[in-house]
Image (tube, rainbow, N blue to C red):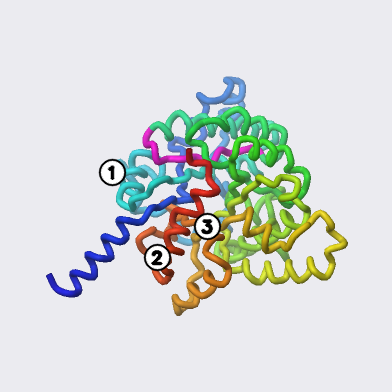
C-alpha cells in the first residue's frame, strides 16, 4: 500500500466513525394527491377529485420552474423510473445506508405548499392530516432511522395545534413542520402552535414550501416579486432573516422558554451581521421592547439552529471555516437536501473544520434540538 492509499484509507475510516443526523430529506408522494385520499373523509377526496387537484409544489408557474426541468436529481430515480424520494426503501438503500446516517428527518414539500398557500383553510386542515397519516403509515415503518416533521395547516393555528396533539406522541415524529405564510413568526397568531409544540417537546421546523415569493399569502422576500428561479432562490434567505428578527423582538422565547426553532435550506452566512445589528439596536433602544430581556445573540444561541445546505462556499474554503468559527459551530446542523439537485453528502461536507466542530454539526447539535427518542 502506498502512502496515498494509506491517506485515503485513514480518511474513509474517519468518515465511517462519524455520527450523522440528516436534517432535511425530501420524500415525494408517488401517484399524486390520490395517494393520500384513503387518509381523508370520502367527501373530501371526492371534492379534490372533482377539482382535479394537484400536489405540484409550484403549480404550473413556468416563471419559477427549475432551469434544468426539476429540482429532483434524475439519477435518484428508482429502477422503475419513479421520481427520486418516492420510495422509502430506495431512500434507505441509496442514501441513508451508504452515508452512514443515524437519523434522517423527512420533510414533505408537497404537503407544505398546499398547507401554506395552494389550498383553502379548510382544505389545508384536511390535507395536513392526510399527508401526516400517509407518512406515519407508509414511510416510518420502513426503517427505524426515519424521523418525520409533521405538517400543520398554517392558515389555522388552532387546527395546527390540534394536529400536533393528535399525532405528536408518535415516537418517530421529531419536529413540527411549519409552512410559512405572510405573518412573521413572532406574531401571537402562532402562539397555539408554539404552545402545543412545547408540550410535546418538538421543535418548530421551517423550510421553504415552494409557495414562498410566488403566491398570495406566502412569505415574500423584500422589495418585490423576483423574476426567475435563480433570483427567487438567492433571496429566500431574506425570509429567514425577517423571521429570526421577529421571533426575538416580539419576545417569543420569553413567552415560550422551551421553544426551539430550526431554519432549513435558508442559509446561515447572513446570521453574523444580522446578530450584530440586532444586538446594537437592542442596546440602544431596549426600552421599546422591555420583554426582550437579554441580548438577541443569546436568544438565537439558546433557541435557534440553521441547517447547512445549501452551503454558500467562498473560493477559499478556509474563509467559510473562519465564518463558522466566528458565529459558533453550535448554531449549525447538517442537512443533505436529498434528493434535490444541489444536495450535499456528509462525507464531503465541512472538511475544513476541526473534527470536534464537524461532529457537532453533523450530529450533536441536531441531537439536542430534534426529539429523537
Is residue 248 among the parts visible in the rendering?
A: yes
Disc 3 + disc 1, Cβ < 8 Å? no
Q: Considering the numbered disc 1 on the image, is that residue within a helix, a strand or a loop?
A: loop
Q: In front: 274, or 289?
A: 289
Residue occupied by mark 2 = 355
Residue occupied by mark 1 = 79
Q: CA distance from mark 2 to mark 3?
A: 18 Å
- Left or right of 340? Residue 17 is left
Neighbours of disc 1 within 10 Å: few (<14), some (14-19), many (20+): few
Residue occupied by mark 3 = 307
- Disc nearer the start of the sequence (3/1): 1
x%, y% of residue 145? 40, 41
Q: Considering the numbered disc 3 on the image, is that residue within a helix, a strand or a loop?
A: strand
Q: CA distance from mark 3 to mark 1?
A: 31 Å
Q: Is residue 148 magenta?
A: yes
Q: Considering the numbered disc 2 on the image, is that residue within a helix, a strand or a loop?
A: helix
Is residue 225 among the parts visible in the rendering?
A: no
Q: Is residue 168 magenta?
A: no
x%, y% of residue 84? 39, 47
Residue at the left extreme of this rendering: 1
Write down the region rendered in magenta: 142-153
Q: How many marks do you count on the picture?
A: 3
- The answer to whether residue 155 is above or below residue 352 is above
Q: Residue at x 71, y 62 (%)?
A: 296
Q: Residue at x 65, y 40 (%)?
A: 198
Neighbours of disc 2 within 10 Å: few (<14), some (14-19), many (20+): few
- Disc nearer the start of the sequence (2/1): 1
- Left or right of 255? Residue 68 is left
Q: Residue at x 69, y 56 (%)?
A: 243
Neighbours of disc 3 within 10 Å: few (<14), some (14-19), many (20+): many
x%, y% of residue 134? 49, 31
Amino acid at each position: 500500500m502506498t502512502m496515498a492509499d494509506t491517506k485515503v484509507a485513514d480518511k474513509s475510516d474517519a468518515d465511517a466513525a462519524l455520527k450523522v443526523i440528516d436534517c432535511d430529506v425530501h420524500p415525494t408522494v408517488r401517484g399524486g394527491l390520490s395517494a393520500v385520499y384513503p387518509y381523508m373523509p370520502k367527501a373530501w377526496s371526492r371534492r379534490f377529485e372533482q377539482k382535479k387537484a394537484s400536489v405540484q409544489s409550484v403549480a404550473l408557474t413556468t416563471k419559477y420552474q427549475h432551469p434544468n426541468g426539476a429540482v429532483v436529481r434524475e439519477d435518484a430515480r428508482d429502477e422503475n423510473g419513479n421520481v427520486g424520494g418516492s420510495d422509502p426503501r430506495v431512500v434507505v438503500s441509496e442514501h441513508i445506508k451508504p452515508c452512514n446516517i443515524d437519523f434522517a428527518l423527512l420533510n414533505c414539500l408537497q404537503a407544505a405548499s398546499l398547507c401554506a398557500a395552494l389550498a383553502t383553510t379548510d382544505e389545508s386542515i384536511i390535507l395536513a392530516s392526510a399527508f401526516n397519516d400517509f407518512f406515519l403509515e407508509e414511510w416510518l415503518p420502513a426503517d427505524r432511522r426515519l424521523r418525520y416533521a409533521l405538517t400543520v395547516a398554517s392558515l389555522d393555528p388552532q387546527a395546527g395545534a390540534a394536529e400536533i396533539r393528535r399525532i405528536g406522541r408518535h415516537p418517530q415524529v421529531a419536529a413540527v413542520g411549519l409552512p410559512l405564510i405572510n405573518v412573521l413568526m413572532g406574531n401571537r397568531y402562532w402562539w397555539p402552535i408554539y404552545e402545543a409544540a412545547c408540550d410535546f417537546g418538538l421543535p418548530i421546523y421551517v423550510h421553504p414550501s415552494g409557495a414562498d415569493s410566488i403566491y398570495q399569502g406566502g412569505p415574500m422576500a423584500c422589495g418585490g416579486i423576483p423574476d426567475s428561479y435563480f433570483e427567487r432562490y438567492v433571496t429566500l434567505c431574506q425570509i429567514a432573516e425577517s423571521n429570526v428578527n421577529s421571533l426575538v423582538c416580539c419576545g417569543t422565547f420569553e413567552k415560550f422558554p422551551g421553544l426551539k426553532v430550526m431554519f432549513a435550506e435558508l442559509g446561515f452566512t447572513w446570521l453574523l451581521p444580522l446578530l450584530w445589528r440586532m444586538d446594537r439596536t437592542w442596546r440602544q433602544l431596549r426600552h421599546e421592547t422591555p420583554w426582550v430581556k437579554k441580548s438577541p445573540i443569546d436568544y438565537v444561541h439558546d433557541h435557534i439552529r440553521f441547517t447547512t445546505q445549501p452551503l454558500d462556499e467562498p473560493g477559499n474554503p478556509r474563509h467559510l471555516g473562519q465564518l463558522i468559527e466566528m458565529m459558533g459551530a453550535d448554531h449549525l446542523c447538517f442537512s443533505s437536501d436529498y434528493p434535490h439537485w444541489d444536495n450535499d453528502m456528509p462525507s464531503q461536507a465541512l472538511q475544513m473544520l476541526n473534527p470536534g466542530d464537524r461532529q457537532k454539526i453533523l450530529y450533536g447539535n441536531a441531537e439536542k434540538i430534534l426529539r429523537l427518542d
